[in-house]
Image: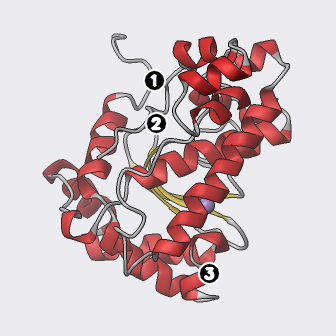
Amino acid sequence: MTQTQPLHARPSPSRTRLAGLTLAAALLAAAPGAWAQAAGGPFTLAPLPYASDALEPAIDKATMELHHGKHHQAYVNNLNNAIAGDAKLSQLTLEELVAKAGKHPAAVRNNAGGHWNHTFFWNIMGPAEKSGTPSPELLKAINDEFGSLDAFKAAFSKAGLSRFGSGWVWLIVDKKGKLVITTTPNQDNPLMDVAETRGTPVLGNDLWEHAYYLKYNNRRGDYLGAWWQVVNWDAVSRHYADAVDHKDGKRGKKK
Ligand code: MN
């Protein structure tokens, strides 16, 4: 298992130093591939936290390799390009860029969203045999809000099917601590100032055709149904616990 970079991580000092070396020195010092990332800017693509065929048959290996290695990599590269030369934007973490997406150029909004969303996405999935179950706390909240886990899954899939064009479907904790299903267009997400419904994502699925077209063609509903096999409920339960803790963004203040 490879530990992925936390979403809130600031650009690594070691990479910043590396970028200052000459090309020859950097090539000698860096592992293959590391140089190209170091030269490109502060954001890098973490490896998948499992093998690219680990989500078969729900998500096929070819889709995973293209989706992670080409699509996600492009969001990372384009984000680095979009903030290059802007001293202010270059200082911000990914979460800070996302939070004020509406105040940034479209290229920053789209690619910071793309980087955040995909990093989140890889980590709320896993091999079907390790899918697990929702924590008791999360299950209770799902039951309270949607009636049952199956009813929740049906509502989530229906929302994903109803989103026209490209986007994402989310389960979020809103500022009152309530579970809400919502969708966002393009690479927006519910953390963004521009989101219609804001909150902290605990689960999300990618509705772009690049996420399913090779295997499912136009059958988005089949993809949405099969995807439940590879949801990592331990990861989702951790996101839920964190989101409830931080729901008002005012931890530590008295009521
Ligand atoms: Mn995608």
Residue 163 in the figure: left or right of residue 155: right
Mark 2 to mark 3: distance in Å?
35 Å
Task: Please report whichever mark, 2 or 3, sits nearer to the chain's N-terminal start.
Answer: 2
What's the mark number on residue 213? 3
Mark 3 to mark 1: distance in Å?
38 Å
Crowdedness of circle 2 by 10 Å Cα count: few (<14), some, many (20+)? some
Looking at the image, which residue is at 57% across and 29% down? Answer: 95
Task: Please report whichever mark, 2 or 1, sits nearer to the chain's N-terminal start.
Answer: 2
Q: Quadrant of residue 233?
A: bottom left
Residue 18 in the figure: left or right of residue 51: right
Task: Please report whichever mark, 3 or 1, sits nearer to the chain's N-terminal start.
Answer: 3
Amino acid under label 3?
A: Tyr
Q: Nearer the viewer, residue 230 or 181?
A: 230
Amino acid under label 1?
A: Gly
Looking at the image, which residue is at 72% across and 22% down? Answer: 23
Q: Secondary structure at mark 2?
A: loop
Residue 86 in the figure: left or right of residue 131: right
What residue is shown with label 2? 175
Amino acid under label 2?
A: Lys
Nearer the observer, disc 2 or disc 1?
1
Q: Is residue 227 above or below residue 132?
A: below
Position in image of residue 232 (x %, y %):
29, 58
What residue is shown with label 1? 249
Position in image of residue 124 (x %, y %):
37, 54
Q: Secondary structure at mark 3?
A: helix
Q: Is residue 225 visible?
A: yes
Count of numbered marks: 3
CB under 8 Å between discs 2 and 1: yes
Image quadrant, ligand 1: bottom right
